[in-house]
Amino acid sequence: MYYLKKVLPNTPGGPEQLDRLVPAHVRIQWAEQNESRHFVIGDALDRMVLEPEKFQSDFYVGTAHSRATREGKAEAAQLRASNPGKRWISPDEFRDIQAMAKAIHTSPYGALVAGRNVAQQTVTWTDPGTGILCKCRPDFRVLLDTSPPKPGEPDTRMRNHAGQVIDEIIFDLKSIESLKKWPSHVDDFGYDKQHA
């Protein structure tokens, strides 16, 4: 997610300043979305695909307990207490996450995920047009081979629209039910605004 370090010229602040500029009802909506199950599942999928060695330290699989009863509340509290700092996912969610991760690894992009990449690394830069300090944390960056081809071999290096050799590709994984829902998904979760 991107944010502006300097929101307005000559205005001190950073992310905190953005919070002051965003209406309260929008901040509440963002907070509620962050607690939704689909965010937990998305984070678990990111971890399983990009940093599988960290999955068990961040998530635990457990049966859902009815919180309508004292016993259910006690069982849920016991499960949370025995997994401090971890986020809960149900066995059905875990099965779905495993299936999605397998689909990614067996897709044409799977080789990129398994190749030379850097996962969950924060990147900062200064926008050359505005001088604004920017920051992002992409799911992963694939580092590409930019060495020139040997004489007689075709040049297979990736290039941008201006013909310049590309040295990396940035990916951000999103989990959605269907590609048909992508436009509304972008709008619902503000992906277009995260790049501003």
Image: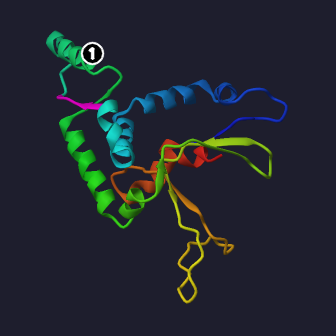
Q: Is residue 98 magenta?
A: no
Residue 75, compared with residue 41, is above or below; it is above
The residue lying furthest to the left in this view is 71
Marker count (numbered): 1
Q: Quadrant of the N terminus?
A: top right
Residue 108 visible in image:
yes
At horizontal 24% and vertical 14% (from top left) the residue drawn is 77
The residue lying furthest to the bottom in this view is 152
At horizontal 37% and vertical 51% (from top left) the residue drawn is 176
Q: Position of residue 152 (x, y in %)?
A: 55, 89
At horizontal 19% and vertical 27% (from top left) the residue drawn is 64
- Badge 1, how many Cα within 10 Å: few under 14, some, many 20+? few
Residue 102, compared with residue 147, is above or below; it is above
Which secondary structure dominates the residues rendered in magenta?
Answer: strand
Q: Position of residue 76 (x, y in %)?
A: 22, 18
- Residue 18, image quadrant: top right
Q: Which residue is mark 1?
A: 81
